[in-house]
Image (tube, grey):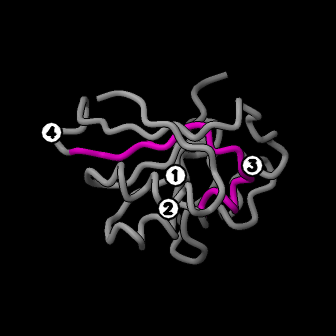
């Protein structure tokens, strides 16, 4: 059977269309398999934490439990990154924002109507 990269040829980026889905090999904007994945229901509470472990000593603000569709999750991450003036990413339903922005992110999410809980130190 082989690994996923062997099955798909390892294509992750195309100069024509940008990032490619490793499963269906379409551009991320037209990814067929991500649209079919169900949104994780969770308990409706967004958990915000600060992490440093495994990141080369750099601090990252992590948001877990945001029950939104992938497109809406990316839009929320973009809005939060702009508010914080920082970079970040969305991976597997988790939003990561570079730097220690826990308080600012919690205020922004509360203003948008999310139930937010700070976890960790």
Q: Callout 3 environment at 10 Å: few (<14), some (14 to 19), or many (20+)?
A: some
Q: Identify the residue under disc 2.
A: 108
Residue at which label 3 appears: 34
* Circle 1 SS class: strand
Earlier in the chain: of badge 1 and badge 2, it is: 1
Q: Who is closer to the viewer here, 72 or 45?
A: 45
The quadrant of the picture occupied by the C terminus is top left
Furthest residue toward top: 1
Residue at (62, 62) in percent of width and height: 112
Q: Which residue is mark 1?
A: 90
- Looking at the image, tell me whether mark 2 or mark 4 is earlier in sequence order: 4
Q: Residues within 10 Å of mark 2 (few under 14, many from 20)?
A: some
Q: Residue at x 63, y 37 (%)?
A: 45
Q: Which residue is mark 4?
A: 57
Quick check: is 71 in the magenta stretch?
A: yes
- Give how far across and how far down residue 47 sits, in percent: 51, 36
Image quarter in which the N terminus is found: top right
Q: Which range is magenta?
A: 59-74
Q: Nearer the viewer, mark 2 or mark 4?
A: 2
Q: CA distance from mark 2 to mark 4?
A: 26 Å
Q: Nearer the viewer, mark 1 or mark 3?
A: 1
Mark 1 / mark 4, whichever is N-terminal? 4
- Mark 2 or 3, which is nearer the eye? 2
Which of the two discs, 1 and 2, sits closer to the camera?
Answer: 2
Task: Look at the numbered disc 3 and give the secondary structure of its residue.
Answer: helix
Q: Nearer the viewer, mark 3 or mark 4?
A: 4
């Amino acid at each position: 059977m082989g690994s996923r990269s062997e099955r798909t040829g390892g294509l992750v980026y195309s100069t024509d269309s940008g990032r490619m889905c490793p499963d269906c090999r379409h551009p991320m904007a037209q990814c067929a398999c991500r649209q079919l994945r169900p949104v994780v229901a969770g308990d409706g509470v967004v958990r915000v934490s600060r992490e440093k472990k495994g990141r080369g000593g750099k601090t990252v603000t992590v948001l877990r439990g945001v029950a939104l569709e992938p497109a809406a999750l990316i839009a929320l991450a973009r809005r939060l990154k702009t508010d914080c003036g920082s970079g970040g990413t969305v991976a597997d339903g988790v939003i990561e924002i570079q730097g220690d922005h826990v308080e600012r992110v919690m205020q922004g999410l509360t203003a948008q109507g999310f139930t937010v809980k700070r976890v960790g130190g």
